[in-house]
Every structure is written in structure tokens, then in C-alpha cells.
Image (cartoon, rainbow, N blue to C red):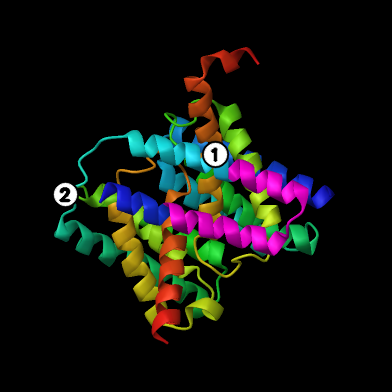
Amino acid sequence: MINSIVLMGVAIFGAIFTSIVSIEWQLGVVRASALTSLIVALFFHFFPSLLSPYLTQHIPVIYFGASFVGMVSPTVHPKRVQIAISAFIYSLIYLCTEGVFMKYGGRLGASAFIAISFTYGFQLALKRFKFLKFF
Amino acid sequence: MHFSSLTLFSVLNFYFLLGVFLRTGAEPMNIFVLSLLCIGMVLTLRFQLSLKYDNQVLFFEIVRAIFFVVIGAVLTYYLIQFLHLSAVISSSIVGLGASFVPSVNRKWPFASQLPPLMYCGSFVGMTSPIIANGLGFIICSGAIAGIFFVLSRNMFHGIGGKLGAVALWAVFVTYFLIFLFN
């Protein structure tokens, strides 16, 4: 349970931090995602005993996928809370899909894509049905 | 072509969700979460269908995309298999290196397209040898990913994870083609 909460926190932090690096620091989406993911991955590569083996293995991976959530454009998710929601959904998908399509390249990206599609889809629906804003 | 491309990508995405559902089981929470994900995706797809844009695809654009995606895939595969770096580190190195190309070489008119192409290729290259079974699979998946990248270039604008999703779709299709012909 604690491991899952830590991984969710890492995902939310990773997505928001990547968004900040990409947009506010103006490094661009690819460089922001690759650079921050590389730093996290190298950190746990050189300090593997800092946390439990489970977290050491999964934190770089979930961060990598969360950085894809952070690559979202401001036109899709203009607010950080929307990025955080997408990152949370992504972390749920990640934790639920352990062992599913594990060896397939692009799995993390697809999970991030689906998470953002989910949040964006409901954003669009809420815009259309304006009366729902009152709830 | 817009509708058929969108249909293909939707089918591959739902295949991914179906795989998740079959693996995690028919528990009420799983059904609820996966249903929400499907609804969200359907809403986004419905929005994509309503968009109108020029979907003309140039042959040279496809060749260029295939070339750089395959390079990204092969480089990442090499870093993982021969230098024994982790998949995340290998993909990040390739992506980071590619991100500096537009800054270094401003004369290329398509330099700005190179980082996402090679980053997408790096996700293909992350495929495990259990699935990939050799460089041929990686090259084939990279080529298909390049085609999908061009076909989807006007779709899902700004949605993060699209590059990875394109890579996963390409790996699915390659695996299916090998299954068909082998």
C-alpha cells in the first residue's frame, strides 16, 4: 500500500515537474522528458540501496511514463491540477498493468496517452454540458 | 484516410485495454476503472473525428519518418543489448541526444521533427528480446511506427504519450504480422 502511494506521488511529481521544465524553463517536451528521466534513472542506478528493491526498480520506470504525461500541451491541460489528475490516472493504470504487455516497447506511453485521453475527454464533455459546471 | 487511420489506432488502443482487463480480471473495481477509461477515450476520439484538416501525406515525409524512427529504435536496442544499460536510461540518452540536433543544426528544414521521431523510435527499441527476437523485428516495428507517426501527425495534438502509443501500436502490428506469416 505504501509502495503504491509512493509511486503515485512520484508519478504526479514527475508529470508536473516535466511540464515545468518543458514550458517554464523552455527546454522543449522531448528534452524535458528525456533529461529528467535520465537523472532519476541514473540516481537509482548509482544508489540502488537507498530505497527498497521494489521502489528502486519501479520509481525510474513510473517516472519515465509520468514524464510523458508532463509532455501534454497547455491547450489540452491548461492547469496543473489537470496534469496531476492525468498523472494519478496514469499511476493507477501502471499499477494495474504490472505484468501486462510488460516487454512491449511503448507500453508506458500508451498508458500515459490513455490517462490523458480520459481526462481530456471528460473535460470536453463538461464544456459541452455547461450545466454540469454547477456540480 | 483520416477516419480509417483513427479507426486503426482506436482498435489498437482498445486492444491494449482489453489485454489489461483480461489480465487483471473481472473484478468490479477493474470493470469500473476500465469502463471510465474507455468512455474517456471514446469522448476524445469523438472530438478528433469532428476536426477537419488536410491529411495529405507525402511519400518523402514517410521515408524520412521511417529513417529516423528506425535509427532511434536501433540505437536504443544497441544500448540495451550490447552496453547492458536499462531501457529507461537507453531511451532517455537517445531522446536527449536527439533533442540537441535542432540547436546544433539549424539549416535542416526538418530538424525540429527529428527529436520526436527518434524518441518514438527509442520506445520501439525498448521492446524486450522476448518479444523482439532480433534486430529485424526492431527495424520492422520502427518502420511501421514511422508510418503511423506520419498518419497520426494531425491527430491527438498535444496529448502526451502519443509517441509511446504509436510505438506500442507498431509493436502490436509487427507481432501480429509475424504471427500471421510464421
- For the residue pair A79 and B101, the one nearer the viewer reads as A79
Disc 2 marks a residue whose amino acid type is Lys
- What residue does disc 2 label? B107
Q: CA distance from mark 2 to mark 1?
A: 41 Å
Disc 1 marks a residue whose amino acid type is Gly
Dot 2 falls on which chain?
A: B
- What residue does disc 1 label? B40
The answer to whether residue A122 is visible is yes
**Marks 2 and 1: which is nearer the front?**
1
Which residue is located at x 29 percent, y 61 percent?
Answer: B147
Above or below: residue A83 compared with residue B122:
above
Dot 1 falls on which chain?
A: B
Give the side of residue A39 with respect to residue B68, left or right: right
| Label 1 secondary element | helix
Which residue is located at x 35 percent, y 75 percent?
Answer: B139
Tell me if residue A72 is in the magenta stretch: no
Percent coordinates x, y for residue A39 in the rendering = 57, 53
Instruction: Using the rendered image, report if marks 2 and 1 lie on a common chain.
Output: yes
Give the side of residue A13 with respect to residue B147, left or right: right
Above or below: residue B76 compared with residue B132:
above
- For the residue pair B39 and A63, the one nearer the viewer reads as B39
Q: Which residues are magenta?
A: B10-37
Which residue is located at x 51 percent, y 79 percent?
Answer: B81
Give the side of residue A83 with respect to residue A56, left or right: left
Percent coordinates x, y for residue B5 in the rendering = 32, 53
Above or below: residue B176 compared with residue B156:
below
The answer to whether residue B114 is visible is no
- For the residue pair B107 and B182, the one nearer the viewer reads as B182
Q: For the residue carrying disc 1, how many other residues have a C-alpha within 10 Å: few (<14), some (14-19), or many (20+)?
A: many
> Which tag, 2 or 1, sits closer to the chain's start?
1
Tell me if residue B28 is in the magenta stretch: yes
| Quarter of the picture holding the C terminus of chain B | bottom left
